[in-house]
Image (cartoon, helix red, strand yellow):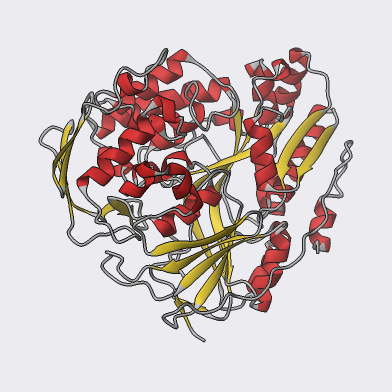
Amino acid sequence: MRSPRVAALLALSLTSALVLSACGGGGGGTTGDDAQGAPTISVYGTEPENALLPGNTREVGGSKILDALWSGLVDYNQQGEPENKVAESIESPDSQNWTIRLKEGWTFHDGTPVTAKSFVDAWNYVALKTNAQSSSEFFSNIAGFDQVNPDEGEPTAQAMSGLQVVDDRTFTVALTAPSPIFVNTLGDVAFYPMPESFFADPAAFEANPVGNGPFRFETRVPDQNVTVTRYEQWGGEQPVSVGGVEFRFYADSEAAYQDVVSGNLDFLESIPGSFLIDNLYQQDLADRNGNQPYAGINTMTFPIYDQRYADPQLRQAISMAVDRQAIIDNVYNGLVQPATGFIPEGVPGKVDDQCGELCTFSPERAKQQFDASGFTGPIELISNVDSAINREWMQAACVSISNTLGVPCNFVPVPTFSEFLDQRRAENLTGIFRSGWVASTPTMEYVLRPQYTTGAANNNSGYTNPRFDALVNQGSTAATAEEAYALWAEAERVLIQDMPAVAINDQSAQFGWSPRLQNVELTYGRELDLESVTVQE
């Protein structure tokens, strides 16, 4: 049910009609205990876009589940610093030639050992062009990538020359150039290992994925849930406490919120905007709520594949027509900060206030540039509305754009994230659409390359600029981290002038949990830390 305070916010003068979707129904209670007698918890989630494969998952709904099913070479602490997980050591004399040694005792959920070959085979599979994996670009700095994934034509090799298995627990990685931040990238889902059963029958594996993480796969019911159960032989230092997790999918985040309040859902990572006003969520969830900044950003992306949005001056005008502070005050209750560039707070190397006036509410300049562009409205803003707060901040942005530019702005809701992703993938979104990014791998490159380089997996706007691509690539092969930061900052300045998206605000997670949970913490990537959470029955 919508808060009257949000209804008042949205009653601002708006010349467009706002099409609203109805609230979805609530969820059921928590699932039963597993065979070991440990309690199972329920966590809010969204339908994964694809099968649960590490190399072909780049959205939050799938990644959250993969992080429960898999463990990588490294994990990240609260400061975004890499810490060894499956790796015993990751060493290099020159930041270009790396030797990775694995810890003993790690196994996959089918009982087979995690070996050096498990990583090398997985990385080669993801990199190979003919496998069409969305994370292939993550291996572009490994020697031989250009042969397994050429820009044009078919591969001339099936494996990257830069990967070599030394023994069961050791493999080497030769990069095309030094990379002082190589270790920082290795916690991404793209780098997870795969068991031999995947390569023997990929289709069967998709139906029953086998990881090496703290939980093993149980069931997947499309548009309803994914359930996982604790893996008793997990190789982590401390066993997890909960017996399993149900990742539950809701049609509306407000229904999920009410289930958390009533104790029918155990964890919700993002409070809907209706309940941020006047900190209502802190009253509803007294002693079971949290607020934690994280390296994430909200953006709105232009469909540059639509010629109406081809002019960067138009895109800049729309950016300057958004009153970010009003959105933060009225929707987020002042709990987040305006974005001053495309790199979120907390990412090493970020330069403050890169964007300047182009990311500041500047109504006169915005109107002048907009009128000069010759664009004739209406303007459309598009978002899925099953996730917390997306509807509210996009509607508020629509109000600001309409009032500033003097043209109708229509908010177009898409009922679910899954439908939204389908439309985005097919380039059927012909208006400005909601986007965002969590720097779950704490590097500037991870923000810039996957979203904005030409043809990248998450480049959903169709943006391309050879100079931007070159600067990102130069940063990736820089001799020192400081040189890399400087080059990526220059790439960000190019991106700002081109404005393929509008940076809105850096993120802070407001989250809540049921009376059952204790020791509730978020990971660096804004997920419930399933390794530390406990349950009091």
- Residue 60 in sight in this render: yes
In the depicted view, which residue is nearer to us: 175 or 276?
A: 175
In the depicted view, which residue is nearer to us: 477 or 384?
A: 384
Q: Quadrant of residue 323?
A: top right
Task: Tell me the quadrant of the picture where the N terminus can be found.
Answer: bottom right
In the depicted view, which residue is nearer to us: 310 or 495?
A: 310
- Residue 194 in sight in this render: no
**Residue at the (73%, 68%) spot, across then down:** 26
The number of discs equals 0
Q: Quadrant of residue 226?
A: bottom right
In the depicted view, which residue is nearer to us: 270 or 490?
A: 270
Percent across and percent down for residue 180 are 23, 35
Q: Quadrant of residue 220?
A: bottom right
- Viewed as shown, does residue 350 lie left or right of 112? right
Percent across and percent down for residue 101 are 15, 48
**Residue at the (45%, 33%) spot, across then down:** 133
**Residue at the (75%, 13%) spot, across then down:** 372
**Residue at the (64%, 21%) spot, across then down:** 304
Percent across and percent down for residue 288 are 56, 75
Image vertical order of residue 77 relative to residue 286, above or below: above
Percent across and percent down for residue 102 are 18, 52
- Viewed as shown, does residue 418 lie left or right of 148? right
Please identify the residue farthest to the left as the structure is shown.
93
